[in-house]
Amino acid sequence: MGVVTGRRAIVTGAASGIGRATAELLAAEGARVVLADVDAARGEAAASSIRDGGGDARFVRCDVTSEADCQAVVAEAARAFGGLDILCNNAGIIRRATVVETTPEEWARVLAVNLTSVFLMSRAAIPVMAAGDGGAIVNTGSGWGLKGGDQAAAYCASKGGVVNLTRAMAIDHGPQRIRVNCVCPGDTDTAMLRDEARQLGHAEGAFLEAAAERPLARLGLPEDVARAILFLVSEASGWVTGTTLVVDGGGLA
């Protein structure tokens, strides 16, 4: 029996990267999972792959900056599964630019996808969790939500907001038996990291090699972060809320 058998989960940004790895691991550990992403083709493929492996998964297309879309994802989980126990707010984008280089439109977009989405999804999900036996929410932050980073002003601001929003939600909703925590990955081998190399005009190989310069001497894998998320939504962390778990191979240290 898996560590989250019978739990009902939503994972945003689930079509690829950390989100897909998280959805796959939750399903492998017994959860019933709704995968949410704006990329319908890859999202459907991810859900289908989980079902082919014997898991229970379905895909709902969701623009996480849309209140209506977020409400629809939660409504589908409640309808299909009879409730909701786990929410993983993972959707995210990055714009590598300073404040001066970032346009107001880019600033608004990064904040909407990375931070406002956590508010919208949680606002829809928390009443459903509270009506049941409570639940666990994990928000994906970043090491750059805990320290500054170069040429990533909007991203750093958004992830700093995610970290402190996590604390505020943990305080407000603990009495409803809802735990809220944050996982802060370091450089992880995803399409988004490779896109950063392109945005900065760096050769991809050299960029990834530099990103691996940390005590454990490698990039993170999506599965590394997924395992940390599994811990935070499982009963193994039953007295853990309002905290930030750094998963970065020692980079922040």
Image (cartoon, rainbow, N blue to C red):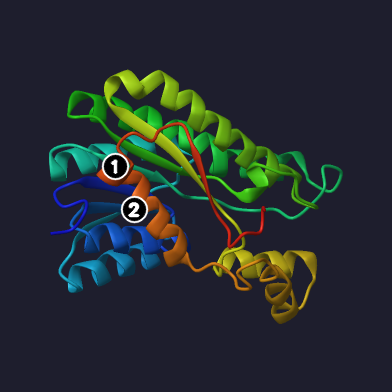
Q: Give the left or right position of residue 232, taking residue 234 as reference.
A: right
Marker disc for residue 164 = none
Q: Residue at 32% x, 58% y: name it.
A: 23
Q: Height in image: 218 above or below 9?
A: below
The one nearer the camera, 209 or 159, is: 209
Q: Residues within 10 Å of mark 1 (few under 14, many from 20)?
A: many
Q: Residue at 56% x, 43% y: name it.
A: 114
Q: Which percent across, then down, holds residue 81?
A: 14, 44
Number of dots carrying numbers: 2
Q: Height in image: 175 above or below 19?
A: above
Determine the secondary structure under disc 2: helix
Query: Residue 173: which quarter of the image?
Result: top left
Query: Residue 176: which quarter of the image?
Result: top left
Q: Height in image: 129 above or below 11?
A: above
Q: Amino acid at mark 1?
A: Ile
Q: Which percent across, then down, holds residue 167?
A: 50, 28
The one nearer the camera, 10 or 1, is: 1
The one nearer the camera, 203 or 74, is: 203
Q: Residues within 10 Å of mark 2 (few under 14, many from 20)?
A: many
Q: Which percent across, then down, holds residue 192?
A: 59, 63
Q: Amino acid at mark 2?
A: Leu
Can you identify the residue that label 1 sits on?
A: 86
Q: Height in image: 86 above or below 215?
A: above
Marker disc for residue 230 = 2
Q: Give the left or right position of residue 37, taking residue 212 as reference.
A: left
Determine the secondary structure under disc 1: strand
Q: Is residue 241 visible in this depiction of the protein?
A: yes
